[in-house]
Amino acid sequence: MGTAVLRRPAVGRPVGLQRPPGERTQILWPRRTCLLVLLLHKLLLPTSSEARQEIPARLQLSYSDLWSANSSAVFSGNGVSGSYQALLLDEDRGWLLVGGRDHIYMLNCDNLEQLAHKIYWPAPKEQVEHCRQAGKNIVTDCANHIRLLQAFNKTHVYVCGTGAYHPVCAYIDLGHSTEEPSFRLLSHTVESGRGKCPYSPLEPFTARLSDGNLYAGTSVDFMGTNAAIFRTSIYGGSPHYIRTEAYQDHWLNEPEFVGSFSIPDTHSLDDDKIYFFFRETAVESSQWDKRIYSRVARVCKNDIGGKRSLINRWTTFLKARLVCSVPGQDGWDTHFDVLEDIFVLETKDPQNPVIYGVFSTSSSVFKGSAVCVYSMASIRAAFNGPFSHKEGPDYSWVEYKGRIPYPRPGTCPSETYDPLHKSTRDFPDDVVSFMRGHQLMWEPVLPINRRPVFMRVSAPYSLQKIVVDRVDADDGQYDVLYLGTDDSKILKVISIPRENWETEEIVLEELTVFQKLTPILNIELSTKRQFLYVSSDVGVTRLSLQRCQLYGLACMDCCLARDPYCAWDGTACSPYFPSNKRRARRQDVRYGDPRIQCDLEDGQIVEERVMYGVEGNSTFLECVPRSQQTSAKWTVQYPLAATSRDLLPTEGRVVHMARGALIQRLDPADAGLYTCLAQEHTFSHVLARYRLVVVSQQRMVTRSSREPGGTGAHPQYGQKSYKDWHLIGKGSLGMDEYCEQLWYREKRRQQKLRSLKWKHAADSRKARVRRHNPPSPSPL
Ligand SMILES: *[C@@H]1O[C@H](CO)[C@@H](O)[C@H](O)[C@H]1NC(C)=O
Ligand SMILES: *[C@@H]1O[C@H](CO)[C@@H](O)[C@H](O)[C@H]1NC(C)=O
Ligand SMILES: CC(=O)N[C@H]1CO[C@H](CO)[C@@H](O)[C@@H]1O
């Protein structure tokens, strides 16, 4: 199918080069695949300026970790519903409405487990039977899947469900009381959901209620082939609607809708527009290569349809390609063409929100996800630019260079601006006929900085959903991205601007929010409560935006975390609220440098531990970095070379492992002071210190009765630990298994040693007395 890589521009290729459709597969596939693999190699190999390594999340929490950290709460509906696709958050009254299969729930935002109210709204029995007879699955398809929940006014919510492949909509009455909401489905308001809600529970879909009209991107047939952007008045009465033309590829071509938003264009209400985001089969890519492109489209809210050939059809519908790609060498870009989700981040300027999109690739060879950011200015620029044009069926798409009729197609009618064009029905004939053929703009919309702000190309998951929180930190404002994956994870990511349009991506957290691995279906953000509500097929989870206490107990740990929600308050890593400027708060999101933020004398003293190893045997020095982004480095100082510290070699007898260093076949000369340093960004600090004492074989075997000399070793310890070492040399264990065992044994041994040391100190006087009568060795 589509490839992830192409040379821009792909449009406007001469039609003569196309092959007849029958020939394509055998001839083109192998070469294209090979070329693609070659290209991917070229693209994915780090180039000098752009060594984009995918850094793991700093904090990774499993479902049970989250649970035990008291950081999440789950609503599962006792498993009777499932498929929780629709969420509606009422921040003011503290309600979360959840739409699932045959059910609508009203939950308390602060206490998800406590079910406040529910509505059971199944599809009628005859419709379920119809659906089953049409060959659909009775359990998964032939139910009333709630797909839409939108606030209609202060007391009513508009709800739509698939109704077992017969969509229906109705109102829910919430009543006036916050404490005692009524939460009733008004059965007398149940009406057809055609053009408002899809037939299928799985069809991608979007709808937005605005001024009593429902704008929806959905199909209106059982098979899902007749898809359009609709506007339906839901004030009852007339079933009047406007739509895009059916079965005309240049309007919409197998679209899959992702999002829709009402965004004002100017201060004039006449200019208000609804923007749709979707993906579709690209008409402008070549005919034999069925490629998916992402789009942004818009219509005027005051479009009432046109005259003649555009009666009940949009007269202001325009669309442009939304590009999310990584610039490569020689103009070869890596494209993420498949829009998965869109988030509109509101700013102080209502006309200029920031648009965040999550994309994946359509290629079967190259899998990856990316997040791109767009400004409204760049979207408007595309709509104000040239149109695409196709002369006839045998031509390809080119830039339209002819005369553009007046008023410019896509302009909303405005009586104050032009009294001759009060409404879209007043548009002249040349505008109407131009609009029938020119929906597509020539220029694509490019992301800010012309590249994604976040990318995952080698991850085992794909990104599906996005929500963004704009957070004020001590050193500026950060957009925190919450990305939902197809395997129950939420990634919490920030992107920090660097020189030359580069950005630094930091995955602060990777959280598994459901026990079962399942795609994240929806996310709602409550900035007021500082919670995220995440839904999937199995439930709804409430997640705190921060878990500062888990970053560590020292100022240094808190600072290195670089989480804009957290700061060191003098005693702990705790939530940061920019308003509390009274207290000295330590935070450095941009650089994460504790040397400036923290008084490093505190909590920096790492206890030196004594380790005993037997000559010829191995010893394991444990050192576990707190974060996955930390690399550990070892230095060693030998007693004879008292001043110099050497880097511990990384080969030969020394094996560096994730949890520490293994020194094999100990030599008496290995004795010394070993220091493990954690390196994060440019900052390094001591994690562990060991004084390694090597006990000679000789001494072990003869169990010397003499007190050991200057090394400080004690035969008693040697004998105790001897048991631990017999494991070594058993070649049957794999290295990992071996180290694992070794590590646990070592941990226990250390504990034992520590208690022994105390005992030893207490008993030292007696021991000196019994010097000539050593205690009999304990059994092995
Ligand atoms: C967990 O959170 C709840 C409510 O937020 C609180 O009442 C409870 O004390 C917390 N438990 C622990 C162990 O922190
Ligand atoms: C909200 O809309 C419903 C349905 O049209 C209507 O019955 C109700 O009176 C409205 N409530 C308010 C407060 O406007
Ligand atoms: C692998 C290895 O060298 N193991 C030795 C550990 O020490 C005991 C006692 O000295 C030896 O018997 C093992 O062979």
Image (tube, grey):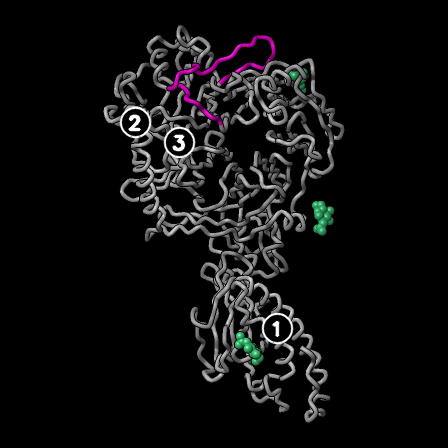
Q: Residues at badges 3 and 2 in contact (C-beta under 8 Å)?
A: no
State the residue position of label 3. Answer: 322
**Residue 416 appears in the picture as rendered:** no
State the residue position of label 2. Answer: 23
| Amino acid, disc 2 | Glu
**Residue 664 appears in the picture as rendered:** yes
Residue 724 is tagged as 1
Q: Is the residue indicated by label 1 positioned so its CB lies within 8 Å of ligand 3?
A: no
Residue shown at 65%/49% (left/top)?
A: 64
Q: Nearer the viewer, residue 185 or 774?
A: 774
| Amino acid, disc 3 | Leu
The crowd level at tag 3 (other Cα within 10 Å; few <14, some 14-19, many 20+) is many
User: Looking at the image, which residue sits at the far front?
Assistant: 732
The span picked out in magenta is 230-257
Say left or right for 670 vs 747: left
Q: Reading the chain from its start, which is encountered first: label 1 or label 3? A: 3
* Distance from Cα at disc 3 to Cα at disc 2: 31 Å
Q: Position of residue 203 (x, y in %)?
A: 52, 25
SS for callout 2: helix
